[in-house]
Amino acid sequence: MLEYYGRECWLKLPGCTKVATTKDHINPHTHGGSDRLENFRPACHRCNSKRQERKVGNQVRIITGPPAAGKSTYIKEHAYPNDVVVDLDRIAKALMPDPEDAKLQTYPDHIRHVAIGARQAAISRATRLRENVGIWIIHSVPSPDQLEEYKRMGWQIIPIDPGERVVRDRIANQRSSSMHDVADRWYDKPSSGESSPLIEPSRDWGIA
């Protein structure tokens, strides 16, 4: 395998050592992958351990964007009935005694803490499914390292952003004022004062 493909790690996830010392299954054994040469790629030990058996390719879709941009609506319009959706707000709401208390998408710190753990577990399980279904993960503002990892895994990144004015108005009318902090992270403004989203946004989805 190394003779055929060389010794450069094909995954190149954040923290990659670049020098391949292991063979990585493109399609893991647990997903029906074979031990044939075409199903192997060279990988460094760190990347191989980080990837484990997660899916590679655009079956996994990462939906990014500021609060109230229309991320959930986009998924509702595009997902198939058997697809899996991982959404921190849905998880947190399900953990509340009365989901109506979470209608502004604000949660006590302990609820959010539990929800974040549940979300991570859901992502881990979902991205290792053997079933041929779409995986939709809402991640509003991924860090540069997280974004790079998603790209290297071949996961499709779909930014949703109807524009800052629309987002600010929706937050004011529909969400907690704390969501402005998340919007600030999305609309990262350099010294020039110009808006500079982390990802080039799509403006096709104006529904909250």
Image: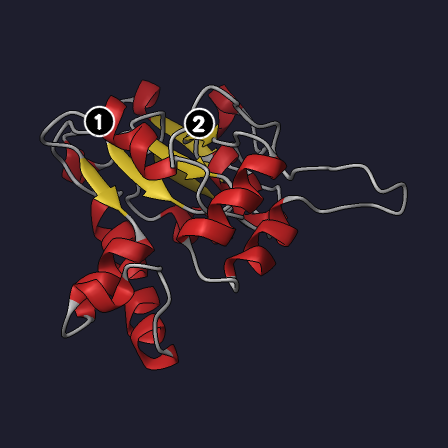
Residue furthest to the bottom:
110
Residue type marked 1: Ala
Question: Contact, CB < 8 Å: mark 2 with mark 1?
Answer: no
Could you classify mark 2 by the number of other residues whose Cα lies within 10 Å: few (under 14), some (14-19), or many (20 or more)? some
Residue 52: image location, x then y, percent: 33, 49
* Residue drawn at x 34%, y 65% as measured from the top left: 116
Position of the C terminus, as image quadrant, is top left
Quarter the N terminus occupies: top left
Asked which secondary structure carries label 1, the reply is loop
Query: What x and y, as percent, mark residue 158?
Result: 45, 29
Is residue 198 shown left or right of residue 85? right
> Camera-side residue: 185 or 114?
185
Q: Amino acid at mark 2?
A: Gly
Which residue in the protein does label 2 denote? 206
Is 60 or 10 nearer to us in this picture?
60
Where residue 47 appears, as percent x and y from the top left, is 48, 47
Q: Residue at x 53, y 44 (%)?
A: 169
Comparing labels 2 and 1, the label whose residue is closer to the camera? 2
Give the residue drawn at x 29%, y 51%. Answer: 123
Q: Which residue is mark 1?
A: 79
Number of numbered discs overlaid on the protein picture: 2
Q: Residues within 10 Å of mark 1 (few under 14, many from 20)?
A: some
* Residue at the spot 15% in from the left edge and 25% down from the top edge: 80
Q: Name the foreground residue: 21 vs 208.
A: 208
The answer to whether residue 136 of the structure is visible from this angle is: yes
Is 4 situated above or below 122?
above
